[in-house]
Image (cartoon, coloured by chain):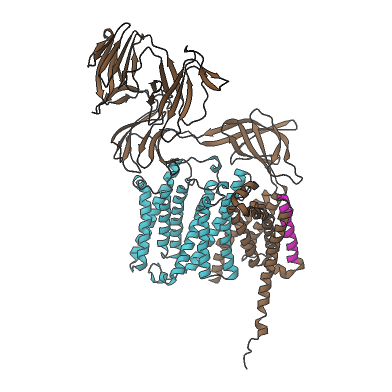
Chain colours: A brown, B cyan
Amino acid sequence: MQPIAPSAASVSVKQPARLAEWQKIAVLVGGGLATGLVLEQLVPQRPAVQASFAALAAIVFTAMGLGFRRELGNTMAGFRFAGTVLAVIAAGAAVGTVVLQGRPPEAYRTSYGALAEAVVRLGLTDVAHSYWFTSQLGLLMAGLVVSLVHRWPVSWRNAGFFLAHLGLFSILAGAALSANLSVRGRIDLKVGGPPATAAALTQPGPGGETVAPLGMAVSLERFAVDKYQTNERLGLYQADARGRLLLRAAYELEPGVKRRLPGGGRFTLEGYYPNVDLSVAGATPRGLAEPGALQVIVDGREVWLTAGSNRVDTEDGEVAVLFALKDPPVAADEPRHEIALADGHTHTVRVAHTVPFAEGFEVRALRFFPDFTWDPETAAPVSASTSPDNPALEVELRAPGKEPARRWLLARPPAFPHPPDGFPEVVYRFRPAAPAKTVIQIIGAERAVLVNEAVEAKRQHLSDGLQLAGGRVRLGRLLADAVPTQRAEGAGPPAQNPIAVLTVAGVPGLDDGEVVLSGRARSALKLPGGQALVLEKPEEDVRSFQSNLLFARGGQTSRGSVAVNEPFTTDGWTFYQVNFDPNDHSYSGLEVVRDPGVPLVFLGFLLSGLGVLYATLVEPRRLRRREA
Amino acid sequence: MVDLTLLLENPTFTATAGGYAGATALYAAAWRSARPRVARVATGLFVWAALGNLTLIVSRWLEAGRPPFKSLFESMVFLAFCIAVVYLVAEWLYRTRVFGALAAGGAALALVYALTKWDAEIVKLPPALQSGWFVPHVVVYFVGYAALFLAAAASVVQLLRPELAVRAGTIFDGSQVSMERVALDSIRFGFAMLTVGLFFGSVWAKAAWGDYWVWDPKENWSLVSWLVYGAYLHLRRVKGWQGKRAAWLAIAGFAVVMFTYLGMELLPTSSDSAHVYQD
């Protein structure tokens, strides 16, 4: 008997059915997308409307798949359909991470130019809530129901499938309930402020309402912000290409521990003084030609005068000793202008002169007004008289890499306001012309001593041991280009004036030796490669913030507390702590939610989770055991 | 930018990374060696490195006073550990070391990448992460990532030279090992972990933010990752996908997972996400 050759007719029977299935899928999925896109043009996006549209689509197609059009049901129960719908959902989710979401229309015109119109019309500005996206969720729900019905009954072989897919259905049903029926709003409370009786809705309600009554009065009894404690540390910063300083490393203050630096070299913390009182305790000669420090004993008290600390007076003010490198130091019969930083470092400045402070920061005195006032007509400061009734000094603050800033410093409060300029606060002290009877001026470079007494001035040569003012002042050593050594005293209470003393070695471009970093003055050890090491106290980050609430309804009160990750539920409302004001700790921002969809969604998580675990871990093992 | 002084300052980290690198070399050598001892030493070194990795995690936990999963650096160190553990379990279950080089190499690579993301300081845990869900959510996800990495590694071996595995002499008991089976089992386990991790995250989101799903970019891509592996399992079971098609899908799926883990900051919408690691 001859085998029957397959005829064209018998070969072609399979193909139309396969094509038809893809056609059905294309109609279902494409139809959902098209309907959604049309709705996008006609109906404003509202969660309740979208959820209703998805639910309606799910019900209609479920009914068609199960009842009226069974061959449609076979398609919807199959993986090709589900896979296609899920692929569209996945693509939509991905697009929603590439296109900006939920921005005002101008943002799209700015970002997308000519494409903005298309982006908006296609509902890409809020993919998750677009009609075309929710149409696919509706189709997915329909497919889940139909596939569950088609695979009934449940057996050990498909228990995982049932649990997982039933769970997915529950999740989607719960999400639809959430979209339709949930109420989500904000309340802003202040301690001691009026209670909130309604929440400002984050999405308008079905009737366009913007507030939802809570059914109770909620007031904030107490708001507490807890911060992490921080301690002083050494921070290594690196400037990036845009000049921003980024933290590269942080070192605990552990004396004796050697640390390697990224650019080469190392440092060791020799000592840390949380609350130091620095005075010039001596000087070390460097061996260059410029005299830098002078030892002076005044009434038996030893003091080192340097360029930065150039004056000492006797207790009774009768004798003043001034030191300078080159120019004669400020004569005692002129008023003195002292500039002090928060760490207590004080410098005397002269008008039209510049005084260096730590690490490149310097102050130039521009003008002095003895009697500062503001002229409203010219909108400029003026001096009302020559009498020092309101002394004020105009200064310019400078630092590398920063715009210079000008300020008026008043010797008497209130301070003259200035805009934030990134420079530290400085205090100005005005010293009227000192009535010292004897003024001794030492000019280091000339090794000359000028003694000015009431009626005569004498010039003499500076020598070690020279006694002046009846023996009250004795001059000591004058050191060539001295480096002042500072005496650190006091461990004191929490670091009010911290310094760290380091030894540095092997750093390219830096001499090995001791370095003092001041926390208050933010002095920095500059390292190669745009890096710097500073002593700092990091900002205290927020550990927690919590609201203690009082709920009042119908004459009864109750209390509850809310913190991040610790919501509080009462009367069907759940309160979530969402934000606070760092500048106003009496304010609390809360979100209030009423969401009937949550139990279904969580049930779905449980069922799906169990189903997946069963299908992936238990079922295959049972199958292998049976096959074995 | 890699700061090599960190290697000198942190000997445990350096030893761990060196152990993984050494294990990679030994596993690779075992492919050509007829001596079982080479492969056994590779396993021993890998176990030693994994213990070093565990030491890093525990010491960081103690020093920080919180679970060490906050920053990209910390999570990478944890990922390396998960890869090591998941691989070692697979090695024991399947009685083969054939993809040990890839696994050890992956763990080493994770630590090298962590080196470029070294934390300048141990950051405190912000209020949003102070939750009992933090540890389970992260652990489940990273164990899942490690299993999916293994699946991708097995798929790579399957695609490159499947017969190489049989000739390698690295199989304990002489039986043949199907890379495809290893990949499928790993994906099943990894998918289960992704599912549980996704649900843990949603329950936590509800407690923290008041909503279980906010279409955050990270959530979206977690969903996409989950769907890709869901598709893999369905296509295998329902459509009989196997061989090269399945292997490529396993590799593509892992690429999606890695993008979900590391690529969020590349997205224009990254500022909308609460999940993006900050540099």
Which residues are drawn in magenta? A42-66
Q: Position of residue A385 (x, y in %)?
A: 49, 13
In the displayed structure, B75 sits above or below A281; it is: below
A222 versus B159 height, above or below: above
Q: x and y percent of residue A541 in the render?
A: 50, 36
Asked whether residue A60 is drawn in magenta, I would say yes
Camera-side residue of A607 and A141? A141
Task: Tell me if residue A151 can be seen.
Answer: no
Q: Is residue A172 magenta?
A: no
**Picture quadrant where residue A375 is located:** top right
Q: Residue furthest bottom?
A: A1
Task: Depth check: give the residue in front, B45 or A582.
Answer: A582
Please, is residue A151 above or below residue A337 in the view?
A: below
Query: Residue at the location (75% across, 61% down)?
Result: A60
Label the magenta part by its dominant secondary structure: helix
Residue drawn at x 35%, y 68% as measured from the top left: B32
Question: Left of A419 or right of it: where is A250?
Answer: left
